[in-house]
Each structure stands twice: as structure tokens, then as C-alpha cells.
Amino acid sequence: MAKGPALVSATAGRAREPIAAEPVIGLEIHVQLLTASKMFCGCAVAFGAPPNTLICPVCLGLPGALPVTNGRAVALGLRTAVALRCALAPESRFHRKNYYYPDLPKNFQISQYQYMDHPPLGSDGWLEFTAEGAPRAVRIGRVHLEEDTGKLLHVEREGAVSHTLIDYNRSGVPLMEIVTQPDLRSPAEAREFLIALRAMLQYLRVSSGRMEEGTMRVDANVSLRGADGAAGTRTEVKNMNSLRAVERALAFEAARQADLLAAGGTVTQETRHWDERRQLTFASRVKEEAQDYRYFPEPDLIPITVEQAEVERVRQTLPELPAQKATRYVSALGLSAYDADLIVRRPPFAAFFERALALYPNAKALANWLTGDVAGLLNAEDKEVDETPLRPEGLVALLRLIDEGRISGRIAKDLLPELVRGGADPSALVAARGLEQISDAADLTRLVEQALAAHPGAVEEFRKGKSRALTFLVGQVMKETRGRANPDLVNRLLRERLGG
Ligand code: ZN
Ligand code: MN
């Protein structure tokens, strides 16, 4: 169906030395869907429940238990496939992916496999995003639904695994798998793509998309393409538990392959695990071929049928997506494209911005504070804004205190960390600590004259034309008042006295 925009090569328009080998990266992303119950049974989906308490004959794979597809999971998959501009299969089937491993009690995973006549839920879409300030598009090969496996816990004693525990609470939890074409050309670009995809999933409310909590899991295929365009052998990298880990693991893997080839070796097609502690990838197993899984249609489930009218209805009811939101912030609110992107890529941040904007109409001032000082504090604490006590009302109260001339911008910056960490009321803080700005001309004149008397050298330099001396004198008054003096007024009073 939908034809994507012309793909923008990662190297287009950039002057660059010819490179011997360019990374070719494709991603396979599993996201946990925000449903109340599991994919094929009524067991609850919940984090942190005691092991093996959210289970039933279906998700334990007991003989004779029959699965029933979770309609909510299908709706979330459909919403995502539409947002990613995929072609929707009028009829898609579930398949059994057979393998033996204790995390999978049935000995097969119910998934959707692509047969010629059995397409997955969605295929051939694309996602636009921004990397290094330039627009990019990555093709989405497919979007399909499947179920999660149980969780193994390897118990170590004296440095060796003594036994393994299994928790089947996660067995049967609804997953959506999104597979990209190998269109990414650098680890940094892969990271930017994942940020954009995560934002989209969060705006769509289909997944919390948190890599650290395992609700978004990323595997990557990496190969090197020679200067002649010949494709190299690819490896699959797993076990990356953060965006930073993805970027580092891909950089490590591309460099490892380049070193191997430069030394006359060959790359082996294999699965490699990222070791976060040692910051390297290591070979874990030879990758199975698709035929090893003996896929065949799941006979216990009816196909998923999608009517064209339903696709249209979903398309009409999609929320504003990140790219549209960014465009609106630029055209309607006058933000820079850079600031707009920084705000929309984090949905809680965009929600905060919009709530603050309803209270305080200066979009640029809000964007400056959010993308500057607030973002800095959030990054330092590795938190999203909705995970802190900072509220739009608090930030707006702070900005109003500046606008009313009651505090200086300097004092506001000093108070902000307390709002982010403790949700303090700025007016109360200012009153309790006597931080009100001094804008009384008589008080400031006295301080200005003291500064002039104490620093005759600076006065001399200013008269010789060194404007830096004025900055120094303003600084002396600010220091004397612990940042409370109105800097504009101090500046004016100094100039009047110096005759500048
Ligand atoms: Zn169950
Ligand atoms: Mn999968």
C-alpha cells in the first residue's frame, strides 16, 4: 500500500572521507503491550507479583488448554501498524514457532510468521525521525503480535550457576515485534531511531517503552558494507538494556568486524551478547535458520481479520504524533526545530510543556527553561519530568516571580533544583529566605557607590574604554547582595555614575 518518502541516506549531503566499510544496521524491537491481561488467556499482566502466581493452564501450556486472542492486544497492534504506515493484512494468522527451552512450557511460541499467503498484521511501513538535525526515514519490514516467554533466574553459588529458577508470570504476556529494514548507518542513528519509535509508542499509549524495565527490548543485526557496496556477513547482537547500551554495543560490534576483516579474517553469522560490565560482545550461539523453528499455522486460533473501514477509523482517531507535534510547535508557537524535537521526543515532557503553556503563554520562555535547566536536572537524575515532584504550576510560579521583578533569573536558576527534587513552592521559598530582588534605587545607589569607592582601578579601566570593567562592578554589587540586586538597575546606576 503506502509508498514511503525517498529514503535519505545517512551520508547524503555530508562531506566525508570515502569509507572502506559502512555499518548496515537493522533492528528488531519487542515491546510489551499495555493490556490488563495476557495474549491468549485471562491472567493479569502485572509487574512485581510473587513468582508463578499469574498463571493458568493456557499460559503454562497444559495439554488440552485452548488459547483465545486478546482483542485489546490486536487493537494496539493495529494502531501501531497504522501509525507506522504499514499495509494491513486483511487476514493474518498466528503460527507456532517451535523450539525447546524451559522458559517456554508449550515448546512453541505463538507468533506470526510471514508466509507468502499469510502476511503478518502489518508490513512495509516507515518511520520518519531526526538524526543529527537531518530528516531520516527507516522502512519497517513488519509488525506482528506474539507472546512473551517465562523468565529464567540463574542462581549462582561461588561464581558458578548452581541451579535455575523459572517464573511463568511473564509467559503469555502480549508482545508486539517491530522489524526494520537494514536502513540504519550508524550506532548514533540507531539510537535516534529508537528514541523516535519509543516516543511514538508512548503517544499511542500502546507500550510504556522502557528498556530498563524490559517493556522495550532491542536486538540488532549488524554487518559492514564494503566500499564496493557488497554486503558483509551479519551478526545479531542481544542483551542491550538501555539506549546507551545499544549505541555502545553497535559501535563495538562494527569495530570488531572491521578489525577482523582488516586482519584478513571473516565474520561468522552468529548471535552475540552485549556484556555491559566488560563493554564488549561475545559469541553465544550459532543463529538458527528460520526452518529450524518448523513454523506452521496455529490450529487453535482463528485468523485476525481487519476490515478496511476499521483501518480508516483507527487512522482518524490517532493522537497527534511526535513529528506533527514538533511541526506545530515550530509553526504555531515559534519554537526552534531543535527545541521542539527535544520536547516532543519525551512525551511526559511534551505533556508538561502543554499544561504549563495553558497557564503561561510565553512558549519560548517555557521551552528555554525546559530544554535547558530542567532537562539538565532530569538527565542528571535519569528521570522523566513526571517522575519528579516538579509541576507545571511550580515552574510557572517561578517564571512569574521573574516577570514581576521579584527575583532575578540567577535566583530562579538556584531555586529550580529544589522544585525538581522537592516540589517546593517558589513564592514560599523566596519569602522564607529573603530572596526578593532589590529594586529600590536608593538602596542600590548606596551599594553602587560602595563598589565604585572600593574598586578605583576598575573605574579607571572603564574610563579607558574597557567595558569588561563594568561587568566586574555589576558582579561586585550582585555578590554583595547574594544575587538579589536587580542587575538591569545596577547596570543603569553604574553607567549613570561613570558617565558611560
Ligand atoms: Zn494464563
Ligand atoms: Mn519475536
Image (cartoon, grey):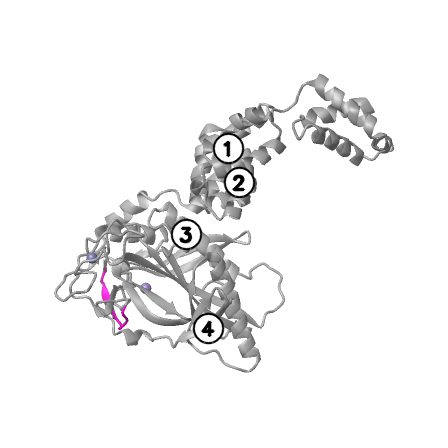
Residue 280 showing in the rendered view: yes
Closest to the camera, between mark 3 and mark 1, is: 1
| Alpha carbon separation for disc pair 4 and 2 | 39 Å
Is ligand 2 within 8 Å of the beta carbon of the residue shown at mark 2? no
Query: Which residue extends farthest left?
Result: 64
Q: Nearer the viewer, residue 364 or 250?
A: 250
Q: Is residue 136 left or right of residue 175?
A: right
Position of the C terminus by quadrant: top right
Q: Which residue is mark 1?
A: 395
- Give percent across and percent down for residue 251: 52, 66
Q: Which residue is mark 2?
A: 374
Label whose residue precedes the other's in the sequence (2 or 3): 3
The amino acid type, in three-letter code, at marker 1 is Leu
- In the figure, residue 472 lies in which quadrant? top right
| Alpha carbon separation for disc pair 4 and 3 | 27 Å
Is residue 9 located in the magenta-colored stretch of the structure? no
Vertical side of 77 occupied by 262: above or below: below
Q: Which residue is mark 4?
A: 282
- Give percent across and percent down for residue 285: 38, 75
| Alpha carbon separation for disc pair 2 and 3 | 21 Å
Q: Which mark is residue 198?
A: 3
- In the figure, residue 475 lies in which quadrant? top right
Report crowding for label 1: few under 14, some 14 to 19, many 20 or more residues within 10 A (C-alpha).
many
Q: Nearer the viewer, residue 41 or 138?
A: 41
In magenta, the rendered stretch is: 92-102
Element on which disc 1 rests: helix
Cβ–Cβ below 8 Å for labels 2 and 3?
no
The amino acid type, in three-letter code, at marker 3 is Arg
